[in-house]
């Protein structure tokens, strides 16, 4: 059965002149425009919900690729922008590149990938290969994956940025053991983006990395907002609290994503999914109200008690 997105439904309802009084409240609570945050260094706005591609887009068989087409289309139809990949993710860049030829409505795409190899020339060749695989003329964001050979690649990335071959430079990790080294790099190098893990069960970065990113005017991309899906195992069989409706949250997925992007220093998060249902759920977190500081605290306490 075809699934209608909230945006499509709202457009249809507006089109038939539905009286405001008879529309469902969850629908009226949301505008057609996704929540966006600014990239500090430029002021350019990004929708707060992006998408990752690790594992989910690393497929080789034709049926699996075809099944991802509606997932990617829903991302753009629901106002998505940033897509994060890496040469580390097997076939993901190639699969994204192939599917991007087939999807519509992708004008807002903000293409991000990573360099993940030792050596200057090897890094250059890998990035050129990624451009071919993802079928982009230039990447909006090129990140150094897991700090690998970062001094060497940073020099290349600064040159490429000056030449207009990439728009922004970033660095990533998902490992706590790299946090100290990452702090030293953020403190000393001019970077536009940093990417690390943050979620309601892992708030380590609130202490140092998030404040440092703010201080240094660096946009923050959050990976693993669901702790690789682990958070859903914690809430399995548990009911979403009624008060989640106060910040337009309809699911546990939206509870977790709205928690992440409501942190003042987070710019965007990149949940990964291979499911259309989950993509629509995730994109729904990019609309309506976000929890304020008091509500965030309530969410933490509630989650810790589960
Ligand atoms: N060092 C780095 O640069 C680094 C490290 C880690 C991650 N990343 C990036 O961050 C992205 C996200 O991290 P991640 O993929 O590790 O983990 P994640 O996004 O925290 O979790 C992904 C898992 O959540 C499930 N899921 C997604 N949406 C759901 C929903 N609405 N309801 C229920 N289940 C849902 C997915 O399964 P289904 O497919 O069944 O939906 C998948 O198993 C990666 O894909 C990658 O792009 C970067």
Image (spheres, helix red, strand yellow):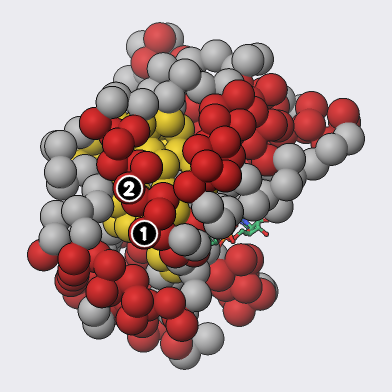
Helix, strand or loop under label 1: helix
Is residue 76 positioned above or below 235 on the image? above
Q: Is mark 2 within 8 Å of ligand 1?
A: no
Crowdedness near tag 1: few (<14), some (14–19) or many (≥20) residues, C-alpha within 10 Å = few
Q: Which residue is mark 2?
A: 155
Residue assigned mark 1? 151
Give the camera-side residue of 120 and 128: 120
Indicate the quadrant where residue 217 lies: bottom left
Question: At 28% from the left edge and 26% from the top edge, which residue is drawn?
Answer: 163
* Rendered position, 23 above or below 174: above
> In this image, 1 relative to 136: left or right?
right
Image point 21% across, 43% down: which residue? 39
Q: Nearer the viewer, residue 47 or 189?
A: 189
In what element is the residue under mark 2?
Answer: helix
Q: In the image, residue 22 lies at what x, y percent?
A: 37, 29
Across and down, in percent, residue 148 comes to 49, 62
Residue 258's disc is: none
The image position of residue 68, as x and y in percent, is: 72, 33
Q: Residue at x 58, y 39 (%)?
A: 126
Is residue 81 shown to the viewer in this render?
no
Q: Is residue 174 left or right of residue 164?
A: right
Query: Which of these two is toward me, 119 or 277?
Result: 119
Q: Is residue 78 left or right of residue 3?
A: left
**Residue 210, position as x, y percentages in the image:** 24, 69
Asked if labels 1 and 2 touch by Cβ distance under 8 angstroms, the answer is: yes
Q: Judge the density around disc 2: few (<14), some (14-19), many (≥20) Cα neighbours within 10 Å.
A: few
The answer to whether residue 149 is visible is yes
Dividing the picture into quadrants, the one containing residue 7 is top left
User: Looking at the rendering, in which quadrant would you find the N terminus?
Assistant: top right
Distance in Å between CA atoms under marks 2 and 1: 7 Å
Q: Quadrant of ligand 1?
A: bottom right
């Amino acid at each position: 059965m075809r699934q209608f997105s909230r945006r499509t439904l709202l457009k249809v309802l507006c089109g038939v002149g539905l009286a405001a009084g008879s529309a469902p409240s969850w629908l009226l609570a949301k505008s057609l425009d996704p929540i966006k945050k600014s990239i500090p260094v430029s002021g350019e706005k990004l929708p707060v919900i992006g998408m990752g591609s690790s594992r989910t887009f690393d497929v080789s068989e034709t049926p699996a690729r075809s099944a991802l087409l509606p997932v990617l289309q829903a991302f753009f139809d629901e106002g998505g922008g940033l897509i994060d990949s890496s040469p580390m993710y097997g076939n993901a860049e190639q699969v994204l590149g192939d599917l991007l030829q087939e999807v519509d409505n992708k004008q807002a795409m903000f293409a991000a990938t990573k360099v993940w190899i030792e050596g200057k020339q090897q890094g250059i060749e890998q990035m050129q290969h990624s451009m071919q695989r993802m079928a982009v003329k230039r990447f909006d964001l090129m990140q150094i994956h897991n700090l690998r050979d970062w001094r060497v690649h940073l020099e290349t990335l600064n040159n490429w940025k000056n030449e207009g071959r990439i728009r922004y430079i970033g660095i990533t990790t998902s490992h706590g053991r790299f946090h100290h080294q990452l702090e030293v790099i953020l403190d000393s190098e001019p970077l536009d983006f940093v990417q690390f893990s943050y979620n309601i069960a892992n708030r380590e970065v609130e202490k140092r990395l998030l404040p440092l990113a703010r201080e240094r005017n660096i946009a923050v991309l959050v990976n693993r907002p669901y702790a690789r899906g682990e958070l859903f195992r914690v809430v399995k069989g548990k009911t979403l609290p009624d008060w989640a409706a106060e910040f337009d949250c309809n699911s546990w997925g939206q509870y977790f994503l709205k928690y992440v992007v409501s942190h003042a220093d987070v710019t965007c998060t990149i949940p990964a999914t291979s499911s259309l249902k989950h993509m629509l759920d995730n994109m729904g977190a990019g609309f309506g109200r976000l929890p304020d500081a008091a509500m965030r605290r309530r969410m933490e306490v509630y989650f810790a008690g589960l």
